[in-house]
């Protein structure tokens, strides 16, 4: 009997997908920019507070985070405009993906009265924190939780373009963050074009991609 998969996201025909067709259908629901194998990338993590002086009672509450959410949308829209018009950014397949920590996004959902995304339910959560995985503790230091509040994945055909976008993000978020850390991605490819084939997964909530064509 042929295997079938019921799509969780309504498709045009809203019918069951057979085993082969689901591999085509999935691309319709994938965030733009995730698949393109850019040769250059930067990962940047932001914290609302300095890590050495972190205090739980100083973290933004749900109401504050909702205002931040609007700012995030404005920042991403502005970045997209820059990508499409800046002479050193356009025509370079530059993209930016924004990730928000599970804890912060949960606060936003609660404040707005909307359900938490299903993907935020961890399979092995810590007993005292549903948004922290036991994997970190069990790895004995192999995996470390950055406790970051925001995370950006910047990709482009140009190293300079990645650096420009990263600088724009740092400047745009300076008023609401106290610390950030940026790291260039290292290519694991043996191909001539050095395409990235191994990247840290994103907590992607919002993504904007622009091509200046």
Image (cartoon, helix red, strand yellow):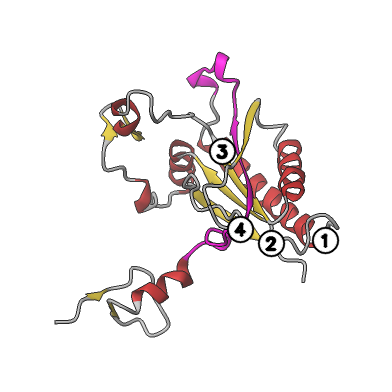
**149 with respect to 193 (left or right):** left
Residue underneath mark 4 = 192
Q: CA distance from mark 1 to mark 3?
A: 26 Å
Q: Position of residue 149 (x, y in %)?
A: 54, 34
Q: Position of residue 159 (x, y in %)?
A: 72, 48
Q: Mark 2 touching mark 4, by CB under 8 A?
A: no
Q: CA distance from mark 1 to mark 4?
A: 30 Å
Residue underneath mark 2 = 93
Residue visible at 46% across and 68% down?
29
| Residue at disc 3, secondary structure | strand
Of residues 141 and 98, the one nearer the viewer is: 141
Find residue 7 and report its image quarter: bottom left
Q: Work out whether mark 2 precedes mark 4 in sequence or the reverse, and give the earlier one.
A: 2
Q: CA distance from mark 3 to mark 4?
A: 33 Å
* Nearer mark to the viewer, of 3 and 4: 4
Q: Position of residue 21 (x, y in %)?
A: 35, 79
Q: Position of residue 9 (x, y in %)?
A: 38, 70
**127 with respect to 187 (left or right):** left
Residue visible at 64% across and 26% down?
179
Of residues 211 and 59, the one nearer the viewer is: 211
Q: Work out whether mark 3 precedes mark 2 in sequence or the reverse, and give the earlier one.
A: 2
Of residues 140 and 58, the one nearer the viewer is: 140
Q: Work out whether mark 1 precedes mark 2 in sequence or the reverse, and give the earlier one.
A: 1
The circle drawn on residue 85 is 1
Q: Work out whether mark 3 precedes mark 4 in sequence or the reverse, and give the earlier one.
A: 3
């Amino acid at each position: 009997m042929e295997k079938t998969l019921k799509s969780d996201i309504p498709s045009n025909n809203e019918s069951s997908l057979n085993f082969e067709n689901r591999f085509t259908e999935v691309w319709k629901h994938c965030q733009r920019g995730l698949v393109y194998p850019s040769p250059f990338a930067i990962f940047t993590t932001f914290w609302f507070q300095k890590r050495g002086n972190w205090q739980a009672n100083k973290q933004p509450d749900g109401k504050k985070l909702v205002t931040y959410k609007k700012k995030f949308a404005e920042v991403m829209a502005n970045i997209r405009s820059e990508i499409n018009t800046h002479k050193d950014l356009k025509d370079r397949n530059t993209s930016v993906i924004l990730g928000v920590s599970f804890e912060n996004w949960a606060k936003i959902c609660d404040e707005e009265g909307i359900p938490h995304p299903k993907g935020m339910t961890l399979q092995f959560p810590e007993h005292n924190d549903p948004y922290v995985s036991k994997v970190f503790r069990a790895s004995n230091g192999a995996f470390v939780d950055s406790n970051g509040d925001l995370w950006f994945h910047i990709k482009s055909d140009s190293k300079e373009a990645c650096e420009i976008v990263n600088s724009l993000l740092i400047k745009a978020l300076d008023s609401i963050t106290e610390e950030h850390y940026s790291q260039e991605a290292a290519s694991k490819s043996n191909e001539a074009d050095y395409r990235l084939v191994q990247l840290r997964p994103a907590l992607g909530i919002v993504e904007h991609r622009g091509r200046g064509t």
